[in-house]
Amino acid sequence: MIQKDLLIKRFVSYVTIDTQSDENSSTTPSTQEQWDLAHKLHQELLDMGLSEVSIDDNGYIMATLPATVDKPLPTIGFIAHYDTTPDFSGTNVNPQIIENYNGKDIVLNEEADIILSPDDFDELLDYKGQTLITTDGTTLLGADDKAGITEIMEAALYLKSHPEIEHGPIRIGFTPDEEIGRGAHKFDVEKFGAEWAYTMDGSQIGELEFENFNAAGVKVFVKGKSVHPGYAKGKMINSIHIAQDFISSLPRLETPEHTSGREGFFHLNGIHGDVEETVLEYILRDHDKEHFEARKEVLNNLAAEINSQYGLELISIEIKDQYFNMREKIEPVMHIVELAEKAMRAVDVEPIIKPIRGGTDGSQLSFMGLPCPNIFAGGHNFHGRFEYVPVESMIKATEVIIKIAELAAKK
Ligand SMILES: [Zn+2]
């Protein structure tokens, strides 16, 4: 029912526009380039004949697909972001379309010998016979999250041309700067006016997520005392060694490289210092709110212990919460997750429900009053040259959106 060729054409038209975001910029969108796609999307929504099409000064785009039935139904939303990560080039994306994938190595770039291989990414074999869209090995693809945008657009187009499908009001939201953690910051939840929404920003087909990390950033400041090394006995305090004691007192196995699933961690991701002062930068992650708070306590207690050993305030700690697990906001409205599950099954997609080891815009939006689970957009290997998306997964995601709209009108 979804026209594959048109979907591919639409997706390619989005990914070939550079929309890399930039965390060092303070504007919204963070980069001028993002406006190029923002204006295009705004125009396409107008051309499609949707209602209440708007774009604000910060590049947030909204539109409404009006209800097709005259009865009170909840307004539901679908959201995707149009920026791509600053971590890898998104300039001159040159998508390669591989039809009827044969399960073998895909040469992305002959010159540079860049190969997308099932030896490295074995889930490629799940897509044998399908149409894959890959990079040419020099950039990312941008399926994160232009696949999500394509799917929402295609679903809106389909529903628009099939008024016989009964559904309530559908809101569409496209945001800038998700990749630098600011996608939801200036999202006007009230203006959006949906009872709940879904971000179309997950990875492989079937993914459905309503749990993410609780997250905090930590700076540990360690003070020392510099004295001429020849005459330092009993006087010098080397902040580097104290920082080393601090680091090695934390559980070595509670780190990203030793954890998975719902296991949290302390991640030391930066250190710089000299005798006088050393600064350690950590991130804390845990799905469980109590464990998350306990991790902060561990750091504070350890600092207090070392300080008391020296009888000096050598260590001070600064902890900033970054985002929270949306689960507590979703659990009271679990029917919205069940609806998505049901919609997936109705189009022969097996739901894969698992906690996200990261955050999403949806977690922030959930805490802003818009409960917002995350649904697969279909891509793999985000944020790098091996990113690819099976077209069949994008078609399924489009069908899931249509089905959710339909089923929400049937309760
Ligand atoms: Zn994304």
Image (cartoon, grey):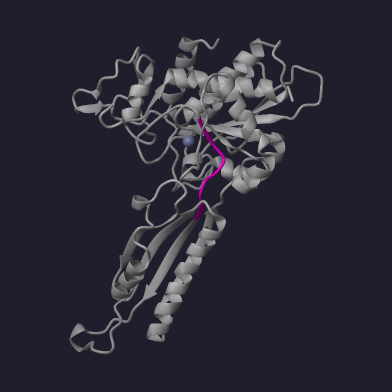
Whole-percent x, y for residue 293 in the image? 54, 62
> Which corner quadrant holds the N terminus?
top right
- As drawn, the residue found furthest toward the right would be 71
Whole-percent x, y for residue 371 in the image? 65, 40
Q: Is residue 57 above or below residue 123?
A: below
Magenta-drawn stretch contains 210: yes
Q: Nearer the viewer, residue 223 or 374?
A: 374
Whole-percent x, y for residue 150 in the image? 51, 22
Q: Nearer the viewer, residue 130 or 311?
A: 130
Q: Nearer the viewer, residue 82 or 306?
A: 306
Region of the chain picked out in magenta, as a range: 207-215
Magenta-drawn stretch contains 19: no
The residue sitting at 52% across, 51% down in the picture is 287
The residue sitting at 62% across, 34% down in the picture is 337
251 displayed left or right of 172: left
> In which quadrant of the rendered view does residue 56 lie?
top right
Whole-percent x, y for residue 145 in the image? 48, 31
